[in-house]
Structures are given as C-alpha cells and as structure tokens.
Image (spheres, rainbow, N blue to C red):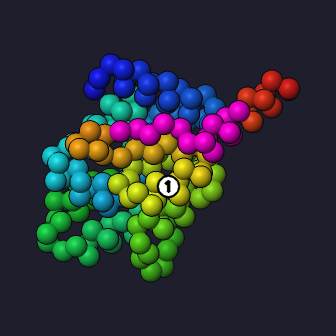
Amino acid sequence: MRQKRAKAYRKLMHLYSQSFGFRQPYQALVDAETCKASISLKIDIVKQLGTVLQGEVKPMITQCCIHELYLEGKFQQPATDLAKTFERRKCNHKEAIPGDDCLLSVVGDKNKHRYVIVTQSQPLRAKLRTVPAAPIVHINRSVVILEPPSDATLRTKAMVSDLEGLG
C-alpha cells in the first residue's frame, strides 16, 4: 500500500476508534459481490482488510448473502467456499432477502455494533453514507479502498466533540 494512503487510513481508523468506539478485531461485514470480486481478482480479502484497516479483522457474512452465493450455483463455488470461512452474522430473516437489504437492516440507522461494511454495491454504499459511524470498504481494480468519512459521520463526530467540550 502506498505510504500516503496508509497514513490517511491510519488517521481514519483513529477517528472511528476515538469518536465511535471501534476496536480490534474490527468486525467486517462482507457481501456476496465482494466475495465474487476477490476471487475473480485473486485478492486475499482477509489479509487486505487487515492491511487497509491497519489492525486485526474478523470477517463476517450474513446468511442472506451466503444464500445469494448458493443461488449462483457451481459457477461461483470458490466465492461460496471463501464466504463459508467467514463467521456467520445472524440476520434473523425467515426468508432470504437481497444482500443489500440484509446488510442495511443489520447495520441499522446507528451502526451500534460497529461494523465495517465491505461491499461492491453502489446503491448500498450510497445508503450507508447516511448512517453515522459506518466505515465503507470496496474494491476498485484489485485495490481495496477505505472510503473517506461520510457527512453524517463528520456531523456526528462534531456533535460528540461539542458535547465533550461542554461537559
């Protein structure tokens, strides 16, 4: 990883840990598309996540995302095998729903369980930018990228630091 990017990521993760209580091992919620992309681009996603987040990572996947991979059939078997190595996150959906909706429901509107969301879905990333304290990671041309903090995250951080200044 380039030094400039590593420094920026270190500062970002410091912001998330100081302002929102993120700690190692970081819980990375991975979606089905990321599993497929990491297999097709020959990326060791767990190792890369550890490098990007600059710490220990616990990759997790929801049952709905696993179901999505099963529906792809034998064609995506390596991605399914990769997903099976991740810890399962219970999403409590009786019937499997689309992966994006599942991840959005697991994260909720506050991300109280402090998940780092690893997704390739553009619409999901747009929705997650409205959730404060939701670090978003995606793959761009075989490079794993941690997005800069969203406006909602920066607003919440400012409110938290203002309250600490008053207290």
Q: Quadrant of the N terminus?
A: top left
On screen, 118 above or below 95? above
Query: What amino acid is labelled 1 in the image?
Result: Ala
x, y percent for residue 163: 80, 31
User: Which residue lies at the image location 44% right of the left edge and 40% below the top edge?
Assistant: 147
Q: Quadrant of residue 144?
A: top left
On screen, 64 above or below 120? below
User: Which residue lies at the image location 63% right of the left edge and 45% below the top edge?
Assistant: 152
x, y percent for residue 116: 46, 45
User: Which residue lies at the image location 75% right of the left edge and 36% below the top edge?
Assistant: 159
Q: Is residue 81 left or right of residue 11?
A: left
User: Which residue lies at the image location 27% right of the left edge and 68% below the top edge?
Assistant: 69
x, y percent for residue 166: 86, 26
Q: Is residue 147 left or right of residue 163?
A: left
> What is the secondary structure assignment of the residue under circle 1?
helix
- Residue at mark 1: 126
Q: Is residue 96 left or right of residue 112?
A: left
Residue 49 part of the magenta segment: no
Residue segment shown in magenta: 145-158
Can residue 27 be seen here? no
Dot 1 alpha-carbon crowd within 10 angstroms: few under 14, some 14 to 19, many 20 or more? few
Q: Quadrant of residue 46?
A: top left
Q: Quadrant of the C terminus?
A: top right
Residue 155 part of the magenta segment: yes
x, y percent for residue 121: 38, 58
**Across the whole image, how many numbered discs are drawn on residues?**
1
